[in-house]
Image: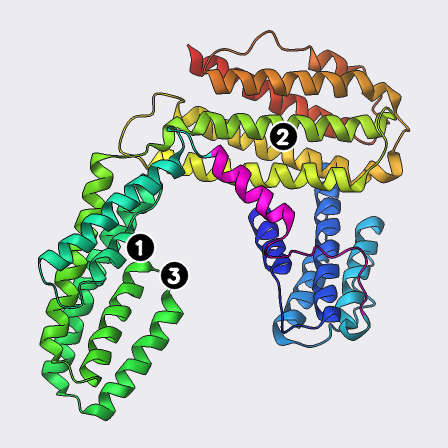
Amino acid sequence: DNLLFQTAQKVLSDPQPFSHRSERAYYWNLYAEAERIREQLATIASRGIPATGTAEILEEIASALEQGRPAKAMPNAFAEIDPRLAGQLRSALHVAQEPEDTTPSGDMPRRRTFSRRVITDAYITIRGNLRWDSAYLQHALRLAVVLFIAVTGERYLHLERGYWAPMTALLVLRPDFSTTFSRGVQRLSGTLAGAVLATLMIALLHPSAAVDIVLVIFFGFLGYLVIVLNYAVYTITVTAYVVFLLALAGMPSHNAVVDRIAATLFGGALGLLCYAIFPTWERSRVPSAIAALLQAHGRYIECLLRVVAGSATLDEADLNKLQSDVWMLRSAANTSVDRMVSEPVRPRNIDARTALGVMAASRRIGLAALSIRAGVKENAGRYPELEPLAAQFGVAFDLLASATREQRRPDAMPALRDLQEQLSPEIPMARDTDLLVDAVNTIADLLSGDAR
């Protein structure tokens, strides 16, 4: 669900020159309501409270969005729902019922293409990747060499429409091993299959110009349908589309098939060979990715608990930023671990089971944080006894991050369990802190075992 929220935020933040401001406000309001509903769901789930009837309301809102209509009134759907969650659901349903009257509930993020912040962020990103151990610098160098060889090779070999060779190399090469080789195999096999399919159709149908037009439209439409589902099938449709398009332009279909196969095989093989000679293994990046996630968890948890303890003021903007950082870093760490697991070499930097175990514990930390966040506003400053635990959580996460990054046993961990057991059961987030302590101790045990 973190990935879904990130995707929705990116889409909403993207400039929409043809949309009305009120329309953008409508979707931003629904996004904000979805975040609040998510927090309340995490809270009642951690306390064992059933969410009966919630799915029906959310499905009606989703259906209304998909069909472009106002949501239906559901006055009897809230009877068995927890009151706080019911309030959030009513608010979301109200927004979905009256899109034309919606005004922004907060400031909508604005993004200018060449604003000072965008340029500064780009500069920081480029500067941060100007080091040899950066996977993106290695990818840029690999891509530059492959494109130079592909362009030079297709001209030296006098390939007809040889631009397919560098284009294939560009599409195949990725910063990581698994994506590069899976896309490479799918691209090459899809091209061969598409060429065979187009050849058979030409031999059997002997298409006229009118039939060529129909086939071009058909394979173009089919390609758009499957582009996200399967890259190999998409490549089949593109190959057939190109063959019939060139045939429509007057080029012999046999020549189009042969040229497509030759250039694609040359570019694809070149890309795969270059990556095999100069690979970038994800295993070297996993410890840093997990360590960054653990540090972000620590900052967020410590801030939440300090607000509830009263030693820090409630700042929604700061909390949103810390929460967004955790989501982004968890997504990056998950991707990094998945890539490492699919690599053909045995990881030496961190054991795959340890990495997967840490990510599982991280999800439990995220669930507890969501529950605490849902009640932070109403409980701000009410429980000063949480202050020692907040400070020690910050220390614990820093120790775990350092141990992960340096691939060693964690230093002596704070006595989190003793501090947690001193809390009164009446504190609303006592159960959440219990879950946090379990997750932190689990990560410490995993790292200790991996370092042996």
* Residue 285 falls in image quadrant: top left
Place of residue 269 in the rendered image (x, y in percent of width and height, measured from the top left): 17, 49
- Count of labels in the image: 3
**Quick one: SS at disc 2?**
helix
* Amino acid type at image mark 3: Leu
Q: In this rendering, is residue 113 above or below 430?
A: below
Eye-nearest disc, 1 or 2: 1
Circle 1 residues within 10 Å: few <14, some 14–19, many ≥20: some
Eye-nearest disc, 1 or 3: 1
- Rounded to the nearest angstrom, the CA distance separating label 1 from label 3 is 17 Å
Q: In this rendering, is residue 7 above or below 385?
A: below
Residue at which label 1 appears: 171
Place of residue 413 in the rendered image (x, y in percent of width and height, measured from the top left): 62, 10
Closer to us: 228 or 93: 228
Circle 3 residues within 10 Å: few <14, some 14–19, many ≥20: few
Extreme-top residue of the structure: 412
Q: In this rendering, is residue 100 above or below 286?
A: below
- Rounded to the nearest angstrom, the CA distance separating label 3 from label 2 is 33 Å
Residue at which label 3 appears: 229
Q: Quadrant of the C terminus?
A: top left
- Rounded to the nearest angstrom, the CA distance separating label 1 from label 2 is 34 Å
